Amino acid sequence: MIGDRIKQARQAAGLSLRALAEQAGVSAMAISKYENNKSTPSSKVLLALSRVLGVRVEYFFRQAKVALEEVEYRKYTHLPKRVLAQIKGDVIEQVERFLELEDYLPTCPIEIFRPPVDLPQHINNYAEIEEVACKVREAWQLGLNPIPGLTDTLEERGILVFQSEAIHGDRFDGLAATVDGIPVVVVGAGWPGDRQRFTLAHELGHLMLKGRLNTALGEEQAANRFAGAFLAPESEVRKELGERRTRLEVRELCVLKKAYGLSMGGWQHRAKDLGILSEAAYRSMVRYFRMRGWHKHEPCDDYPREQPLLFTQLVYRALAEDLIGESKAAELLRMPQADFHAQRNMDRAEPATVDQ
């Protein structure tokens, strides 16, 4: 129903009824009636709503209906319900577009997610999680080197990754859910790359460790240990840092952050977890960073942000195989058709002629 689509788009845009009404040039009562399917907006009103909400008119007639299941919000503190509704609405809209695209493709574009079969059934302490992370890397043929594109790595193994502009600030560490049994992970689009990567690895840890942890172990702490071990395997950490250290140099941590996409704080934690730094030395470094405000803004360049590529690549694949047209491709990518046409033809300029 059109009303459901209007409400979803409004929530995804983070607008109240009154705010949408004012920007679209109609009354809040009219918006309420549209959303409750008591009235149908005219074509003129739909155009105004599409402009304000940043969607194409076709969006309001999309038939896909997505339900997020097993939704987990990570570290959110006193976020208004409106903000949570905006995050959820944004995620649902992105998932809907992915599933709609999937319907056009002759075969399912992603694998079914399955944990490697040889993972231990019971994990009794945090140190055993190191082995789990290594087994996942081995099963996925990742070796021990830094993983350059973690988003691609997860999507290739059946985990949908989305980014949301609605997720920002320090009070929210992402969202995990399932859609028709497919794991979905959402991170902030504006976050630094190292924060995005740790959140993605953390959520992967939840998936890999589910049902395996001793009841005495904390799930969040276990997922954090997995994330660190997955991004920087123990053997490589020991090669980089050695077996015992009394402190780590700030510039040294900057270099390692750039190489592995794990934050400077993450490297300190890895050194403590592996016994390279003593608890006292680790606490000393943490205090040193806090005194300078580096626990919030680390003193080196941000790691590049992750770039989800699968969806865009599949849109162009469907277009190349004449499964969809330009209008549908532009709608799926949430672009004006003229902009999409220009982008599509960026390499199609006619070669310059040379006068003889």
Image: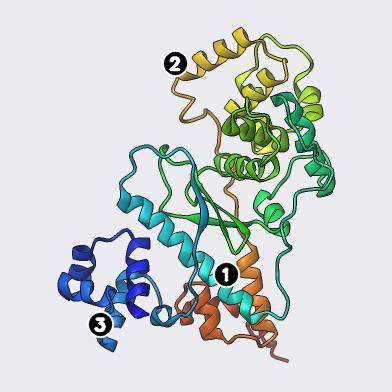
| Residue drawn 52% across the image and 75% down it | 332
Q: Amino acid at mark 2?
A: Met
Mark 3 surroundings within 10 Å by alpha-carbon count, few (fewer than 14), some (14 through 19), many (20 or more): some
Disc 1 from disc 2: Cα separation: 45 Å
| Res 275 → quadrant | top right
Q: How many marks?
A: 3
Q: Which disc, if any, is residue 291?
A: 2
Q: Are marks 1 and 3 in contact (CB under 8 Å)?
A: no
Front one among 208 and 124: 124
Q: Where is residue 88 drawn, in percent x and y? A: 43, 57
Q: Nearer the viewer, mark 3 or mark 2?
A: 3
Front one among 318 and 174: 174
Q: Badge 1 is on which residue? A: 98
Q: Badge 3 is on which residue? A: 45
| Residue drawn 79% across the image and 43% down it | 137
Disc nearer the start of the sequence (1/3): 3
Quarter of the picture holding the C terminus: bottom right
Q: Amino acid at mark 1?
A: Phe
Disc 1 from disc 3: Cα separation: 27 Å
Q: Where is residue 136 drawn, in percent x and y? A: 78, 43
Mark 1 surroundings within 10 Å by alpha-carbon count, few (fewer than 14), some (14 through 19), many (20 or more): some
Q: Amino acid at mark 3?
A: Val
Q: Are marks 1 and 2 in contact (CB under 8 Å)?
A: no
